Amino acid sequence: MAYKKIQYKFIWMFLLTSVFPLIIIGLVAVSLLGKMAHNQAVKDMGDDLANSQVVYRNTGEHLKYVIHDQNRRVSTLLYEDQVDLLKNEYAKIVKNENLDFFVVTDAKGKVLVSMSNFDLEGFNIARTLRMRGALKGEVFVSTEILDTVDLDRLGLTKKAKITGIENTQGLVLEAAFPVINQNEIIIGAMCGGYLLNNNNQLIINDIARHTGLVASIFLKDIRVSSNVPSSDGKYAIGSVLDPAVFKVILDGNNYSGPIKVAKDIYMASYAPIFNNENELIGILGIGMPEKRVFALRDGLIKIFIIAVICSAILSLLLGFFIGGRMIRSVRKLRKGIEAFARDDFSHRISIKSNDEIEELAEFFNKMMVQIHEARNKLHEQEKMATMGRMAAIVSHELRNAFAEIHTSAYYLKEKVAKNFPQLESSFRNMESGINSADNILNSLLVFSRPKKLILGDVSVNSIIDDVLGSINLEEICEGNKLEISKEFDPNIAIIKADGMQLKQVIINLVLNATQAMSGGGKLVVQSKNEYKSIKLQISDTGPGISKEIMENLFKPFFTTKSRGLGLGLAVCKEIIEAHKGKIKVDTEPNKGTTFTITLPV
């Protein structure tokens, strides 16, 4: 059960580190993207509204030129009193230009031609504002409101009718011009224009073509022209603008923002429409479905949902896979601990995970090796302690025996040697053997019971001089020539050390070096200062040391000599390490050997 809990922890860890941050990032990104989309949409809607106003103005300009271009022909036909021909010709023009009305009057305002309602002919309309100005020579193009009387006169009542709206008024874009003859005399007036009610073919389609948006034209707050779809599949003509939005427009401001039309939300922009007297009579509006504005955001939401699901699945798989590997590693660690508990120090853990668990396994393996070596060393130390105790007892007994032998030998030498000179060499051999045995006992005692350091100010140069002065090199070399070279640093640092024990080290190394050059050679002893330490080198020009001997050189009881216990270099190493120093050896076949000692200052 514990293993499963670890695996579940990995699953939750992956979920927490991948899925939950992804959700948070996704929510923040979606929120920011929504705000960015909204702000960008508001900006774009403002630009598109400006373009839509240009389309609206261009339609008025086009109407202006259409009506203006008829002046010469109309004035000619009126001068020639060709009213019927005028009607025939302008029936085609009205049809080609999609005009909803075209009216021509004489100089007094009596209607001569009415292309939308022939019954208006003969009536005097000079009192209407636009015709009164035209008869005075004024030209204007503007958006105006026609009341029910005007609509009826022009025959546009049915065409202007908005379903659900009683007493429908008409919103028209019209142009009025005076009719001037060749003598620059006003002989009448003409007026033409477009009815915007229910008319999507004119401005609405042009706006949609230029901006790709839906558009609406309002007569005050009533939508009279629009390509915004309604819930019944038709256009939302006749709907009333939101009062809050209409209030913004009435205050003379444009509006940009969300608005609901026929159950759908649009991002919309609205601008007021003014008549010739600068009165607000309508509104031009464009819009974009909100779902189109936030299409990128909604697409991103879908991507994030898919990413979260994939991340969750991946987290589960990784949790099971990595958690399983972790559990197997933990089991191996547990087996290792069990092996440690039963003193099986040969057990090793093999984990290849390239992480801290692998490091822990390697540390465990090293620890097992160290414990095994420590156990062996402890056993060796116990043996050495036993040997030391035994060596002390044996040494005590043997020293007493050696003393008696030495005394007896001396006595015999005094009594017998004078009468038997040929026995003198035998007595010398006996004394040498006793001294050699005594030295072996001393080495054994030193190795089994290392002496405590007695530190004092020591000059290594002085110790070397004492050693070289006390050794009978001629006896060692048996008459062979031995050259000694001392290369001392005169400013060698004074160190804190046990002078007697260092002297023993130097004696051992010098004797080894001279014995290695039994046929003659050169002994070089160097001393010099180094950074925070001194270095002592003892070199010989002997035959060197073989690789097999080098591997066991400092091991106790290893010797290549016919006499001795092989403790000399082992004792040297212990003494140097007790001084927190180091000893190393470099050798080259047939060129010699150098022992280097480094001691801290």
Image: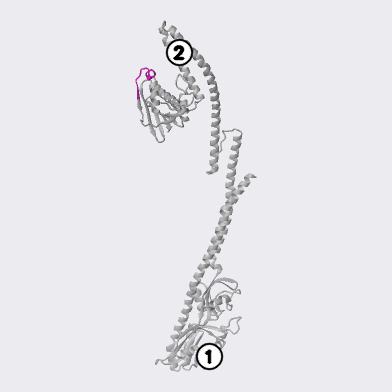
Q: Is residue 476 magenta?
A: yes
- The residue furthest right is 1
Q: Earlier in the sequence, mark 2 or mark 1?
A: 1
Q: Position of residue 132 (x, y in %)?
A: 48, 90
The residue singled out by tag 1 in the image is: 118
Relative vertical location of residue 63 with respect to residue 328 in this rendering, above or below: below
**Quick one: 361 or 496, which is closer to the camera?**
496
**Disc 2 and disc 1: Cα gap in Å?**
166 Å
Please tell me which residue is depicted at 46% across the width and 11% down the height of the picture. 409
Q: Quadrant of residue 238?
A: bottom right
* Above or below, comparing residue 471 to residue 76 in the picture: above
Q: Which residue is the site of mark 2?
A: 430
The disc labelled 2 sits on which kind of residue?
Met
* Region in magenta: 472-484
Residue 220, x across and y down, in percent? 55, 80
Judge whether residue 588 can be spotted in this image. Answer: no
